[in-house]
Amino acid sequence: MEFEHLEEKEAVERAALLKKNGRAFYTLLSVKTADPETADVLERLAKEEERHLKLIEEKFFPGAGFPEEITDEEIELEKYVERCCVSELFVKKIDVEKLVHLMDSDKKALLVALEVELHASQYFEKLGSMAGTEEARKLYKELAEEERGHVREIETLLG
């Protein structure tokens, strides 16, 4: 896929960072939680984030001029995201370990995760509507639907 506009490249950077931070967040939380059901869901979400990251890297990184795998140094999105809110937390370079350390309850962690997953589903839906090819449109729509599935799983845990 060729990237004709810088905005498309930034969108891919943002999507990849969203997945990378999500994977780290869920992995660390799954170890921290004492509830086995919550830990299982968080482990599954971490694996899903890893799979999504690989899909994004395989489909879009060569066309965007990125190497095969994303690194922290390649993702500088502070200039792209000007306002700060929880839903956009994972599209910034953050210390996920410090964030998890601040989570003093499963409920607080799940509420952060819920907002981030809602944002991710909306973000991928928007990318799908703006995609230049049918292949990209289909991939982003599938990712958006999977993110909505994550929302449902988290809502179930929250009761």
Image: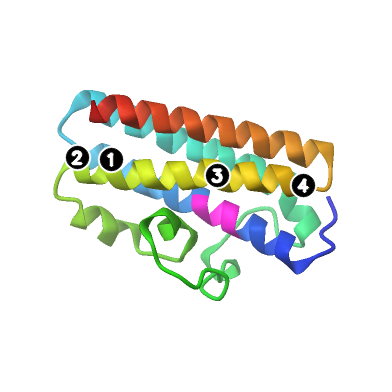
Q: Is residue 45 left or right of residue 111?
A: right
Q: Mark 3 is on which residue type?
A: Gln
Q: Which residue is mark 4?
A: 131
Identify the element where label 2 is drawn.
Answer: helix
Judge the density around disc 4: few (<14), some (14-19), many (≥20) Cα neighbours within 10 Å: some
Q: Which residue is mark 2?
A: 106
Depth check, mark 2 against mark 4: the one in front is 4
Q: Which residue is mark 3?
A: 122
- Indicate the position of residue 81 as horizontal and vertical percent values: 52, 68
The number of numbered badges drawn on the structure is 4
Depth check, mark 1 against mark 3: the one in front is 3
Looking at marks 2 and 4 on the same chain, the residue that comes earlier in the sequence is marked by 2
Identify the element where label 3 is drawn.
Answer: helix
Marks 1 and 3: CB-CB under 8 Å?
no
Marks 3 and 2: CB-CB under 8 Å?
no
The Cα–Cα distance between marks 2 and 1, rounded to whole angstroms, is: 6 Å
Q: Mark 4 is on which residue type?
A: Ala
The Cα–Cα distance between marks 3 and 2, rounded to whole angstroms, is: 24 Å
Residue found 33% across the figure and 34% down from its top: 42
The Cα–Cα distance between marks 4 and 1, rounded to whole angstroms, is: 31 Å
Looking at marks 3 and 2 on the same chain, the residue that comes earlier in the sequence is marked by 2
Residue found 28% across the figure and 58% down from its top: 99
Depth check, mark 3 against mark 2: the one in front is 3
Residue found 64% across the figure and 31% down from its top: 142
- Indicate the position of residue 58 as horizontal and vertical percent values: 71, 44
Q: Is residue 58 above or below residue 159?
A: below
Identify the element where label 4 is drawn.
Answer: loop
Q: Is residue 73 left or right of residue 56?
A: left
